[in-house]
Image (cartoon, helix red, strand yellow):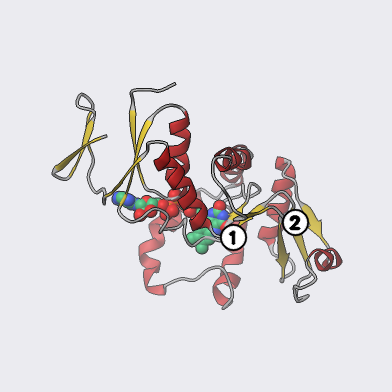
C-alpha cells in the first residue's frame, strides 16, 4: 500500500540502505542523504561476516582482564594512543559501569533476538538483486591460538545459554575442514550457517541501485543541523530547506 508519509534517512551505509528498502516495501517515499558516495564508510571496509551468532557485545567485565595482553601483543585486536587516555576516562568509567553480568546478559538476549532474524531479512532483500556469487554460504570458523582466554569461555557459555548453534572444533576437525591453515591453533569454533561477503561494497551498491530503481532518492549532502517543520513536511539544513 502506497503511503503519503515521506522519510529521510541520513547515511547511505548498509544500515541506511537496508532500512530504506524495507520502508519502500511498506509504501513510504524514502530519501537517503550522505555527505559521501554510498558505502564509502564502515560498510566499505569491514570483514564481510554475516554473523547472527555475534550477540555478545564488549560490555563485559571479563574482557577487562584480557585488555593488557591485547594491548601488549603486536598482533592483538586493540591499539591505544596513550595521549588519548585522559580524554577517554569518562567514557571508560561508563563502560565499566555497564559491564555487569546483568547488563551484559540484557544486551546479549536482545541482540540475539534481532540477529536471529538477520539472515532471513537479508535474503528478502537479496531476492531482488543479482548477487552474482558475492556471498559465500560455507560457514565461518574461528581458530584459537592462545589457550585459556577468559572471554572466549564466557562467549561459548553464553551462546550455549541463548541456544545459538555453535560447533566446538578439535585441531583435527579444523584440519579436516581447512587443511590449508598452518596448525598454530589448539581449537576453534564453527558457525556453519554463517556467510561471508566477498565484497561488501559491491553488494551495497546493488542494493542501492535497487532502491533508486524503486523510486528512492539520493542527495549528497553533509547534514549538520536539523530543524523540522511538521506542517510544511520539510526540514532545514543550515539555510537550505529540503522538501522530502
Ligand atoms: C574493521 C571492521 C570490521 C568489521 N567487520 C564486520 C563484519 O565482519 N560483519 C559485520 O556485520 N559488521 C562488521 N563491522 C561493522 C560494520 O561494518 C558496521 O556495523 C556497518 O557497516 C555500519 O553500517 P552503517 O550503515 O551504520 O554505517 P556506515 O557504513 O559507516 O554508514 C554511515 C554513513 O553515514 C554517513 N554520514 C555520517 N554522518 C553524516 C552526516 N552528518 N551527513 C550526511 N551523511 C553522514 C557517512 O558518510 C556514511 O556513509 C566491521 C567494522 C569494522 C570497522
Q: How many marks?
A: 2
Numbered label attached to residue 97: none
Residue at x-position 24% and y-position 49% = 224
Q: N-terminal of the two: label 1 or label 2?
A: 2
Q: Is residue 90 visible?
A: yes
Q: Which mark is residue 198?
A: 1
Q: Viewed as shown, does residue 193 lie left or right of 85?
A: right
- Position of residue 56 in the picture relative to residue 41 (left or right): right
Residue 58 in view, yes or no:
no
Q: In this orientation, which residue lies closer to the viewer: 33 or 101?
A: 33
Q: Position of residue 31 (x, y in %)?
A: 33, 39
Identify the image quadrant of the C terminus: top left
Helix, strand or loop status at disc 2: strand
Inter-mark Cα distance, 1 to 2: 19 Å
Q: Is residue 161 left or right of residue 74?
A: right
> Within 8 Å of ligand 1, the CB of disc 2?
no
Name the residue tied to disc 2.
190
Quarter occupied by residue 177: bottom right
Question: Residue 4: image x %, image y %?
Answer: 33, 23
Task: Point out the frontmost of discs 1 and 2.
Answer: 1
Taking the view exactly as shown, the residue that stands out farthest to the right is 172
Q: Are marks 1 and 2 in contact (CB under 8 Å)?
A: no
Return the residue nearer the eye: 214 or 73. 214
Mark 1: few/some/many CA within 10 Å (<14, 14-19, 20+) = some
Residue situated in front as seen by the camera: 187 or 138: 138
Residue at 47% x, 49% y is 14
Q: Quadrant of residue 213?
A: top left
On screen, residue 114 versus residue 93, left or right, reads right
Question: Can you name the residue that lies furthest to the left here?
Answer: 239
The residue at 20%/24% (across/down) is: 231
Amino acid at each position: 500500500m502506497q503511503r503519503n508519509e515521506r522519510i529521510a534517512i541520513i547515511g547511505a551505509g548498509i544500515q541506511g540502505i537496508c532500512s530504506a528498502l524495507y520502508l519502500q516495501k511498506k509504501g513510504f517515499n524514502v530519501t537517503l542523504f550522505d555527505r559521501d558516495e554510498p558505502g564509502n564508510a564502515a560498510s566499505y571496509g569491514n570483514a564481510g561476516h554475516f554473523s547472527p551468532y555475534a550477540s555478545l557485545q564488549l560490555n563485559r567485565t571479563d574482557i577487562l582482564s584480557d585488555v593488557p595482553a591485547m594491548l601488549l601483543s603486536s598482533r592483538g585486536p586493540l591499539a591505544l594512543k596513550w595521549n588519548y587516555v585522559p580524554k577517554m576516562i569518562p567514557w571508560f568509567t561508563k563502560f565499566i559501569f555497564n559491564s555487569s553480568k546483568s547488563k551484559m546478559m540484557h544486551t546479549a538476549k536482545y541482540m540475539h533476538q534481532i540477529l536471529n532474524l538477520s539472515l532471513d531479512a537479508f535474503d528478502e532483500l537479496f531476492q531482488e538483486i543479482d548477487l552474482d556469487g558475492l556471498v559465500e554460504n560455507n560457514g565461518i570458523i574461528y581458530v584459537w591460538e592462545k589457550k585459556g582466554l577468559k572471554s572466549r569461555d564466557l562467549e561459548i557459555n553464553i551462546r550455549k545459554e541463548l541456544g545459538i548453534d555453535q560447533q566446538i572444533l578439535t585441531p583435527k576437525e579444523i584440519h579436516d575442514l581447512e587443511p590449508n591453515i598452518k596448525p598454530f591453533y589448539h581449537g576453534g569454533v564453527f558457525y556453519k550457517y554463517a556467510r561471508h561477503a566477498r565484497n561488501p561494497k559491491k553488494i551495497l551498491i546493488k542494493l542501492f541501485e535497487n532502491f533508486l530503481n524503486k523510486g528512492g532518492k539520493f542527495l549528497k549532502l553533509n547534514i549538520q543541523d536539523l530543524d523540522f517543520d511538521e506542517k510544511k513536511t520539510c526540514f532545514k539544513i543550515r539555510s537550505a530547506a529540503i522538501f522530502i
